[in-house]
Amino acid sequence: MATIKVHQGDITTQPVDAIVNAANQRLLGGAGVDGAIHRAGGPAIMAECDRIRDQQGGCPTGQAVITTAGELAAKHVIHTVGPIWNGGSNNETELLKNCYQNSLKLADQHGLNSIAFPNISTGVYGFPKQQAAEIAVATVNHYFDVQSTTLEKLTFVCFDDENYSIYKGLI
Ligand code: AR6
């Protein structure tokens, strides 16, 4: 069972075993947290994303892949692809759950001790923040209830004030 914390700030400065990226299916980088991670981590991260794209075409929504963290303080970046909000009846909840679950599984497969998550899908992809936060917190709690894990610390890194206050109310 890992300790769960909430932090407000920039995920790229987190000194953890893995930070999670809210990526897109082609792993091509973009705006938001994805852009910030590639800018701060340097080209080594995209070089590994390029290799993954060549091997498997990218990363489907809800799945996760792992790369180096390049020049970041973290050791790895776990790239997961959140669902684009489209009214809520297009499996968005299940797909967002999968993002958290599959990122945690990948961290465990690599024996990682600490992980930091951004608020996946709540920026460009438009997922309502309160609902996304409830899904995130319930999913990680459930994971730690049912899985044995190498993780000791999980941090939700909130960038904007609204997400930070929502998470403070849930943790
Ligand atoms: N550290 C932590 N959180 C951040 C940071 C940061 N440096 N910058 C933004 N956020 P978004 P999405 C928060 O849009 O909705 C990209 O173009 C932000 O406040 O980054 O999953 C990808 O390539 C928000 O709460 O990701 C995809 O195409 C959260 O990160 C698409 O956007 C997620 O916002 C993914 O959209």
Image (cartoon, grey):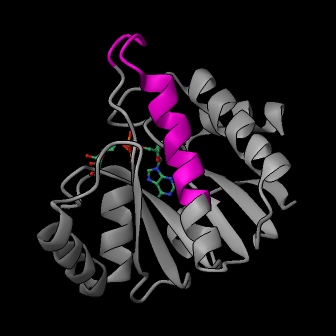
In the image: residue 165, left or right of residue 91? right
- Report the residue at 55% width, 81% height from top: 74
Residue 129, horizontal then vertical, whole percent: 55, 27
38 w.r.t. 81: above or below:
below
Q: Is residue 118 visible?
A: no
In the image: residue 57, left or right of residue 124? left
Residue 77, horizontal then vertical, whole percent: 46, 72
119 w.r.t. 9: above or below:
above
Query: Is residue 28 on the magenta stretch?
Result: no
Where are the magenta residues, as a range?
Answer: 86-104
- Report the residue at 16% width, 74% height from top: 50
Depth check: 100 or 131 in front? 100
- Report the residue at 65% width, 67% height from top: 115
- Report the residue at 27% width, 50% height from top: 24
Depth check: 166 or 101 in front? 101
34 w.r.t. 171: above or below:
below
Number of labels in the image equals 0
Q: Quadrant of the C terminus?
A: top right
In the image: residue 148, left or right of residue 81? right
Query: Is residue 87 on the magenta stretch?
Result: yes
Residue 3, horizontal then vertical, whole percent: 86, 60
Residue 170, horizontal then vertical, whole percent: 81, 32
